[in-house]
Image (cartoon, grey):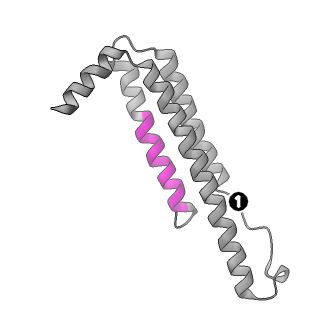
Amino acid sequence: MANKREFKKYADALGASVVNEMVSAYYNVEGADQDKIAEAIRVALGAVGKAKNNANVYFDKGMGAFEDAAAYAKAKRDFFRSLFDKIETEFSEEINEALKIFNSAIPEEVKARNKEIAGK
């Protein structure tokens, strides 16, 4: 991600899209396990909140801790790159977990019908 603002927008957009599909299935798919879908929604919303909250971290060292401005800039860039890689990995894992829970809540006949429709 280029910066915190873009990462937060990305997390919001992805989370909203996933939750929107889950809510739609919650109300419209007959035979779906609504408790599992509600749990999947909770996990997805938690992942978005956690990712956005973890993105609010600042580099805790000042320029005086480095020999020159170039070393400071490199250390700061490396810190944020590794931080956002970690946050994005955790976010993706949590969203995937929510999708696994959601998929287990959908009846097999609905999944088979959706695969058939997608194949045409």
Residue type, label 1: Val
Instruction: Locate residue 44, reporting x and y percent.
Output: 53, 35
User: Where does label 1 land, which residue?
Assistant: 57
Instruction: Give coordinates of residue 38: x percent, y percent.
Output: 51, 22
Q: Nearer the viewer, residue 23 or 111?
A: 111
- Range shown magenta: 5-19
- Residue at image point 54% right, 61% down: 5
Based on the displayed image, in which of its 4 quarters is residue 4 positioned?
bottom right
Task: Find residue 27 and report its horizontal and vertical position in percent.
Answer: 37, 19
Left or right? Give the position of 28 relative to 44: left
Q: Secondary structure at mark 1?
A: loop
Q: Quadrant of residue 24?
A: top left
Give the camera-side residue of 72 and 41: 72
Task: Please name the predominant secondary structure of the magenta segment in the image.
Answer: helix
28 versus 42 height, above or below: above
Mark 1 Cα within 10 Å, few/some/many (few <14, many 20+)? few
Horizontally, residue 112 falls left or right of residue 67, namely left
Residue 1 counted in the magenta span: no
Q: Residue at x 49, y 29 (%)?
A: 100
Seen at 84% across and 82% down, the residue is 64
Q: Residue at x 62, y 65 (%)?
A: 81
Q: Quadrant of residue 63?
A: bottom right
Looking at the image, residue 27 sits to the left or right of residue 62; the answer is left
